Image (tube, rainbow, N blue to C red):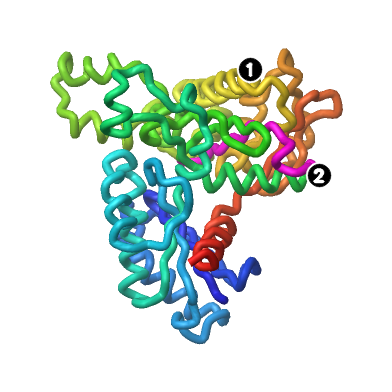
């Protein structure tokens, strides 16, 4: 049974074709909608993906695809992956206002595949699902309780597919069942989040009602005093739409550095002595250290800390600055850390009380597994 796992990001499409859990083909389409990219929107990106798959030699026809699994960022309180029907499409639309960079393009991918392969089942795998084990003390905001009960305003968490997959891989590397491990998983990419996992279950995570809360990201600021937003509207006369655009598209590493949102170019500026690039990395890593330290306190005992995603698995400088936590018994091995780029590896020193791992995220494999599970249950 051939399953296509589709991961539509804000400006990219990652895809993998599986036969069961065996990967047959994969690809990445980047810079969608950006100036000079030549790829206008996600629908054109999907068409390019279909062309590549058809010419890969792994498919004689797209009709060989038996099911399609889609990453969907915000599913609200939905606790498991779902076969996509009108109700699920309605839920994805409903939560688009809370994940404006993601849910709309997730839905574009779904609708494009439904048009391309009518009758083939599509499954939504939600980034919020893995975090639904958080206790009330972690997910409630200290706002009037009716906002939670009547409008669902609470912390949901995101990147759940990545955190789940990385926690499984960490368990394999550590040689212990996930149900017996306490982990802190750091997903550092264009979007960034951290999860505290006790005995295999999430007890807290850095993102909240939307993917804006928590860590500094490529274009999002993470934690900000809500009073700043009131000042922007009342004091500076910005409209809600202008504030929305600023928070989602103009802040984070881009806003701090003034050099773009790609950590690779900011690291180059850091080594050149560019003050704004230095500030951007300092703020980024300080926020990660603060969350790791807090989650050590919440978990008490920590078996391992993992770093994953584009920055986490490929930027030794950032890992070193984030995990410089000797008072907590966390010590990196400089040589191991420098060598671990794009690979699974232990990067802590022998004296470290907590293991530190660089782990490659394979969200598409988790999407394929979940798709098969849903279809099996159906």
Magenta-colored stretch includes residue 257: no
State the residue at coordinates (61%, 41%).
308
- Determine the residue located farthest toward the right in the rendered image: 350
Q: Position of residue 201 (x, y in %)?
A: 61, 37
Q: Which quarter of the rendered picture does the N terminus lie within?
A: bottom right
Q: Which residue is mark 2?
A: 175
Q: Residues within 10 Å of mark 1 (few under 14, many from 20)?
A: few
Where in the figure is residue 159, as x and y percent of width and height? 49, 42
Element at label 2: loop
Helix, strand or loop status at disc 1: helix
CA distance separating discs 2 and 1: 25 Å
**Could you tell me residue 72's position as x and y percent?**
41, 51
Is there CB contact under 8 Å for labels 2 and 1?
no
Is residue 182 a member of the stretch shown in magenta?
Answer: yes
Give whichever of 221, 86 is nearer the camera.
86
Q: Residues within 10 Å of mark 2 (few under 14, many from 20)?
A: few
Q: Residue at x 49, y 76 (%)?
A: 66
Query: Dividing the picture into quarters, in which one does residue 376 lie?
Result: bottom right
- Residue 58 is drawn in which quadrant? bottom right
Q: Earlier in the sequence, mark 2 or mark 1?
A: 2
Disc number for residue 297: 1
Q: At x 72% / y 23%, what residue is drawn?
A: 301
Residue 114: name its quadrant.
bottom left
Above or below for 355 versus 232: below
The residue closer to the viewer here, 18 or 33, is: 18
The reply, left or right, for residue 282 in relation to residue 171 is: left
Question: Which range is magenta?
Answer: 174-190
Observer-nearest residue: 147 or 65?
147
């Amino acid at each position: 049974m051939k399953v296509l796992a589709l991961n539509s990001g804000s400006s990219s499409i990652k895809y993998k074709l599986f036969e069961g859990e065996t990967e047959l083909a994969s690809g990445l389409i980047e810079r969608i909608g950006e100036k000079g990219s030549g790829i206008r929107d996600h629908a054109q990106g999907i068409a390019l993906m279909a062309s590549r798959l058809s010419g890969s030699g792994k498919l004689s026809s797209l009709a060989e695809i038996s099911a399609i699994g889609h990453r969907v960022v915000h599913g609200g309180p939905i606790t498991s992956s779902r076969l996509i029907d009108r109700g699920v499409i309605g839920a994805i639309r409903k939560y688009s206002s809370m994940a404006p960079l993601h849910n709309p393009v997730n839905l574009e991918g779904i609708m494009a595949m439904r048009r391309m392969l009518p009758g083939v089942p599509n499954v939504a795998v939600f980034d919020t699902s893995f975090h639904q084990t958080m206790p009330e003390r972690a997910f409630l905001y200290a706002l009037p309780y009716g906002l939670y009960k009547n409008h669902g305003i609470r912390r949901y968490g995101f990147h759940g597919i990545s955190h789940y997959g990385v926690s499984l891989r960490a368990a394999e590397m550590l040689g212990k069942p996930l149900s017996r491990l306490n982990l802190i998983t750091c997903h550092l990419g264009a979007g960034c989040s951290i999860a505290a996992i006790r005995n295999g279950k999430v007890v807290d995570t850095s993102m909240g009602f939307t993917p804006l809360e928590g860590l500094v990201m490529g274009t999002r600021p993470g934690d900000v005093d809500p009073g700043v937003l009131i000042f922007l509207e009342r004091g500076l006369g910005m409209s809600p739409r202008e504030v929305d655009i600023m928070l989602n598209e103009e802040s984070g590493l881009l806003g701090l550095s003034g050099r773009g949102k790609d950590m690779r170019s900011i690291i180059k500026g850091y080594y050149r002595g560019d003050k704004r690039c230095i500030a951007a990395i300092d703020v980024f890593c300080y926020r990660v250290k603060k969350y790791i330290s807090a989650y050590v306190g919440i978990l008490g005992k920590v078996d391992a800390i993992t770093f994953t995603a584009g920055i986490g698995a490929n930027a030794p400088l950032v890992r070193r600055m984030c995990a410089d936590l000797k008072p907590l018994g966390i010590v990196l091995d400089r040589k191991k850390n420098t060598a671990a780029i794009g690979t699974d590896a232990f990067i802590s020193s022998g004296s470290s009380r907590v293991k530190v791992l660089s782990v490659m995220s394979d969200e598409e494999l988790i999407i394929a597994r979940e798709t098969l599970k849903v279809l099996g249950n159906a």
